[in-house]
Image: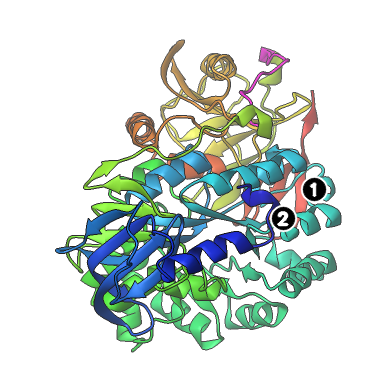
């Protein structure tokens, strides 16, 4: 059956087959007997039998089917069953790719993922991106998407990538469930009627709008609610959670590599007397592989329980609350008749990491053993080919004469500063924390050369095709090592390469568009941890180097960024130094 060509999730003939099971004329494909399961609407643990036909729960209650001809019967005594968890805010391109991330997530019981489309919007031609959206519908994990309204950086041809027609086509895709996240909200409040129109289009199509409002004042939250925002994941204190709830937002509580806020949020919410959890959901906000070593949403449920959230509420925040927010309760969030068969089997109610997982009625994990159920994808068909640069970088390109540099105050804030060191040498001293920094067009047309202060003291040459836009980042003390890392990055079809004293000391190949790996998340965890160790030994002092690479260009963060157009002043929305044509 071709899911893509179909208007409804289940065709008429499938619905007739499901009814025939209830009448005993057909057999279910799986029967879960003696099941103790969490009932989302009664808010109780119930016992009963769960009948599954293909990817759908067709009955939950006390009855047993009379026809068991082609049925796998599973005795669930000793297990506690909860609905599959939902990750509402994934960035499925943090070295892993949407498929490897979904495979890994499923092992930990996260069986529905709502994904950022940024890499697809920036890297893939539209038709290819849409065929990718259709093809991933075959995954056992349910994949939904958002539609970005801006590129989160200053783009050369933004009006082409984010044109009226393109946004409208993205919003029409049935697996796209929201507009956002609204990283460009200052532009919106400053009078951008195009973005306002897109929000109205999304609301007209009954799709949600995801905010991105770090540190927003009550006035901003009020205005954004009036404009149409429904949810925000940027609350960093209990008071910020309270303010968002006060104005009617759904609040996504975050636990990510750079903002592991959940424990503090829950403590501060408790102190403020927040005891209603219906408008609260969880997200890990697209963390790099190593953050997921101990799990995904299951980890957040565990933390919530440890912080005194009632057990049933903790599960609801990961399941039915998300489904309700996205208006998909008829498919997700509960173990009730008619829902998609995403079910986690737990050993105890207070241990949310499942031992077995059903995703769309298929075993993706059985008694701790993972089963391979994901179809192979032809990535090149979606425009995700290895990087093959047809141009060379020369020593002439490594001229640094700009008077203004970028100072990394912390993981997310960068300030402008005056460069006082001599940048005409081939190598900078390791006695300070200033390094050469370059952003180069992946097509070789332009470059931006500056100095970054605070990144590291002893990183000689780091090259990365992993970046916000897929353009190429070079950072380091030594022009020779930067060139060497760049050449090696091209040889391996894209990736992150670290060079030192004319040797390659570490590499993470990213052959999917120079952004993503083909490897399983487990293998990537080891590669990323090694990169982090090597960088820390060389004076990198922040939490997350992967996010540092992503954020060099991110104009939704203060105060200064390196972009396709040049060095950009975020607050004044101006280019301070334009990019140089090569």
Instruction: Determine whether 245 is above or below 51 in the image.
Output: below
Q: Secondary structure at mark 2?
A: loop
Q: Name the residue nearer the viewer: 421 or 80.
A: 80
**Percent coordinates x, y for residue 394 in the rendering:** 68, 13
List the residue tagged with mark 2.
150
List the residue tagged with mark 1.
158
**Percent coordinates x, y for residue 389 in the rendering:** 68, 18
Image-based side of 389 in relation to 452, left or right: right
Q: State whether residue 438 appears in this view.
A: no
Q: Name the residue nearer the viewer: 389 or 305.
A: 305
Q: Name the residue nearer the viewer: 370 or 69.
A: 69
Query: Mark 1 near mark 2, Cβ–Cβ under 8 Å?
Result: yes
Disc 1 or 2, which lies upstream in sequence? 2
Q: Residue at x 53, y 74 (%)?
A: 325
The quadrant in which residue 67 appears is bottom left
Q: Residue at x 84, y 50 (%)?
A: 159
Locate the C terminus by quadrant: top right
Farthest-out residue, top? 502
The residue segment tinted magenta is 383-395
Q: Residues within 10 Å of mark 1 (few under 14, many from 20)?
A: few
Q: Residue at x 45, y 35 (%)?
A: 433
Q: Residue at x 24, y 71 (%)?
A: 305
**Percent coordinates x, y for residue 532 in the rendering:** 37, 35
Main SS category, magenta section? loop
Mark 1–mark 2 Cα distance, whole angstroms, equals 8 Å
The quadrant in which residue 302 appears is bottom left
Q: Which mark is residue 180?
A: none
Is 388 contained in the magenta span?
yes
């Amino acid at each position: 059956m071709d899911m893509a060509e179909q208007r409804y999730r289940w065709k008429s003939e499938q619905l007739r087959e499901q009814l025939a099971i209830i009448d005993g004329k057909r057999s279910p494909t799986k029967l879960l007997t003696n099941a103790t399961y969490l009932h989302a609407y009664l808010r109780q643990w119930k016992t009963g039998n769960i009948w599954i036909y293909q990817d759908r729960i067709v009955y939950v209650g006390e009855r047993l089917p009379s026809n068991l001809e082609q049925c796998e019967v599973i005795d669930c005594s000793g297990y506690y069953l909860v609905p599959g968890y939902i990750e509402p805010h994934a960035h499925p391109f943090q070295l892993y790719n949407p498929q490897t991330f979904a495979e890994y997530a499923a092992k930990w019981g996260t069986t529905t993922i709502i994904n950022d489309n940024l890499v697809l919007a920036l890297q893939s031609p539209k038709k290819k991106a849409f065929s990718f959206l259709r093809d991933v519908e075959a995954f056992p994990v349910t994949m939904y998407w958002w539609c970005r309204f801006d590129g989160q950086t200053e783009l050369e041809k933004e009006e082409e990538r984010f044109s009226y027609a393109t946004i409208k086509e993205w919003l029409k895709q049935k697996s796209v469930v929201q507009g956002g996240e609204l990283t460009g909200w200052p532009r919106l409040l400053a009078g951008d009627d195009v973005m306002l129109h897109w929000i109205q289009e999304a609301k007209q199509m009954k799709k949600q709008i995801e905010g991105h409002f770090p540190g927003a004042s009550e006035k901003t939250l009020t205005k954004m609610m009036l404009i149409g925002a429904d949810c925000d994941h940027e609350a960093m204190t209990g008071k910020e959670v309270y303010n968002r709830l006060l104005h009617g937002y759904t609040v996504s509580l975050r636990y990510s590599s750079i903002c592991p806020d959940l424990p503090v949020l829950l403590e501060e919410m408790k102190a403020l007397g927040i005891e209603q959890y219906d408008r609260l959901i969880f997200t890990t906000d697209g963390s790099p592989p190593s953050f997921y070593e101990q799990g995904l949403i299951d980890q957040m449920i565990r933390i919530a329980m440890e912080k005194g959230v009632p057990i049933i509420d903790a599960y609801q925040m990961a399941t039915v609350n998300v489904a309700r927010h996205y208006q998909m309760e008829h498919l997700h969030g509960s173990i009730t008749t008619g829902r998609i068969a995403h079910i986690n089997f737990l050993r105890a109610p207070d241990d949310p990491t499942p031992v077995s997982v059903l995703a769309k009625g298929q075993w993706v994990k059985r008694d701790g053993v993972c089963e391979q159920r994901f179809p192979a994808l032809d990535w090149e068909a979606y425009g995700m080919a290895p990087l093959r640069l047809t141009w060379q970088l020369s020593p002439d390109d490594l001229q640094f004469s700009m008077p203004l540099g970028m100072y990394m105050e912390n993981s997310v804030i960068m300030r402008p500063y005056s460069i006082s060191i001599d940048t005409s040498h081939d190598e900078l001293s390791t006695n300070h924390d200033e390094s050469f920094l370059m952003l180069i067009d992946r097509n070789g047309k332009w470059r931006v050369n500056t100095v970054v202060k605070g990144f590291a003291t002893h990183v000689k040459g780091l090259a990365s095709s992993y970046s916000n836009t897929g353009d190429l980042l070079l950072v380091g003390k030594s022009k020779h090592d930067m060139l060497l890392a760049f050449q090696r990055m091209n040889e391996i079809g894209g990736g992150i390469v670290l060079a030192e004293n004319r040797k390659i000391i570490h590499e993470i190949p990213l052959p999917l568009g120079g952004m993503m790996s083909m490897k399983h998340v487990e293998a990537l965890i080891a590669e990323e941890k090694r990169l982090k160790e090597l960088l820390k030994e060389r004076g990198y002092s922040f939490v997350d180097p992967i996010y540092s690479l992503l954020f060099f260009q991110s104009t939704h963060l203060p105060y200064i960024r390196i972009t396709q157009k040049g060095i950009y002043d975020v607050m004044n929305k101006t280019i301070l130094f334009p990019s140089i044509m090569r």
